[in-house]
Amino acid sequence: MAPVGLGPTVGWLSRAVPLLLALSAGRAPALPEVCKYCPGPAHHTSEVDHYCNRTQEFKMRARCCLTKQGTIVGLDLQNCSLKELDPLFAEAHSAIVLDLQANPLLNISTSIFRNFTELQMLVLPLNIDCPGGYHAWDNITCGIDSCTCQGQRSPCNSSVEPVLCPENAYCVPDGPGLFQCLCTSGFHGYKCLREGSFPLLMFSGILGTTTFCISILLWGTQLRKIKAS
């Protein structure tokens, strides 16, 4: 039984809470900044638009094809007058289809696509090579004004350029033509030579103590300057 005087308040909360939950559940996730990188909607001729329309679970918003959870699965930045790709581009690392054609791009570093492990179709201006080269893709086709890189290959399974990870480490893909070596369970440190689990508690304790001491030192220095002035 509610305390005297709280009856109306409790009743109001019991009605308001479900309403707020319903509104928050129906609200679309915030649009990633890279989706607004170029004004206007995606082109209807874009591979991104075609890919998005084939699946009911996906929806085009601005320049992005998004899942219901707001994950980017496609990004259309064609004809956006781009001369280079800045760090904001990394927001699209989950993209499966990416269209960059009709841009005056001078060059694209392969490292720009680090962590783009889901990418399966990349459309580029004719003068730009597919990141990682021919060994990184199943198929590369070029038309009059663009090239399409399809079917990203794992460099960890390549027989042409075999990956050599240190002992006690294994290879994982990290984007077109890119990989990283991770330590197997029970090893850590430089080239995975140290056996045992990483001493996280000790590391955190040392880092925290060091940070605290530096903060006290800086605070004392600034306090002396204030008193001197």
Image (cartoon, rainbow, N blue to C red):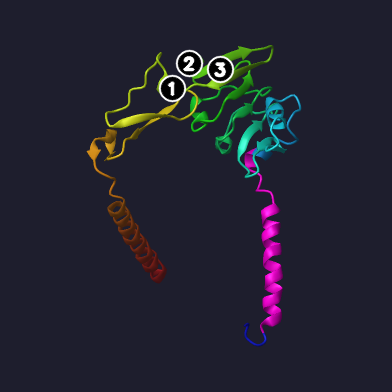
Left or right of 84 on screen, residue 211: left
- Is most of the magenta stretch helix, strand or loop? helix
**Front in this rendered view, residue 47 or 25:** 25
Would you name the residue on which mark 1 appears? 155
Please, what secondary structure does the residue beneath circle 2 have?
Answer: helix
Q: Earlier in the sequence, mark 2 or mark 1?
A: 2
Q: Earlier in the sequence, mark 3 or mark 2?
A: 3
Q: Is residue 19 magenta?
A: yes
Q: Are marks 3 and 1 in contact (CB under 8 Å)?
A: no
Asked whether residue 37 appears in the rendered view, the answer is no
User: In the figure, 19 relative to 108: above or below?
Assistant: below
At which x and y percent is residue 25?
67, 54
Amino acid type, mark 3: Asp
Which region of the structure is painted magenta?
6-34
Residue 135's label in the rendered image is 2
Residue 129's label in the rendered image is 3
User: In the figure, 229 relative to 139: above or below?
Assistant: below
| Whole-number angstrom distance, CA of label 3 to CA of label 2 | 12 Å
Query: Residue placed farthest to the bottom in the image?
Result: 4
Please, what secondary structure does the residue beneath circle 3 have?
Answer: loop
Amino acid type, mark 1: Pro
Q: Are marks 3 and 2 in contact (CB under 8 Å)?
A: no
Please, what secondary structure does the residue beneath circle 1 have?
Answer: helix
| Whole-number angstrom distance, CA of label 3 to CA of label 1 | 17 Å
Q: Residue at x 43, y 22 (%)?
A: 155
At which x and y percent is residue 16?
70, 68
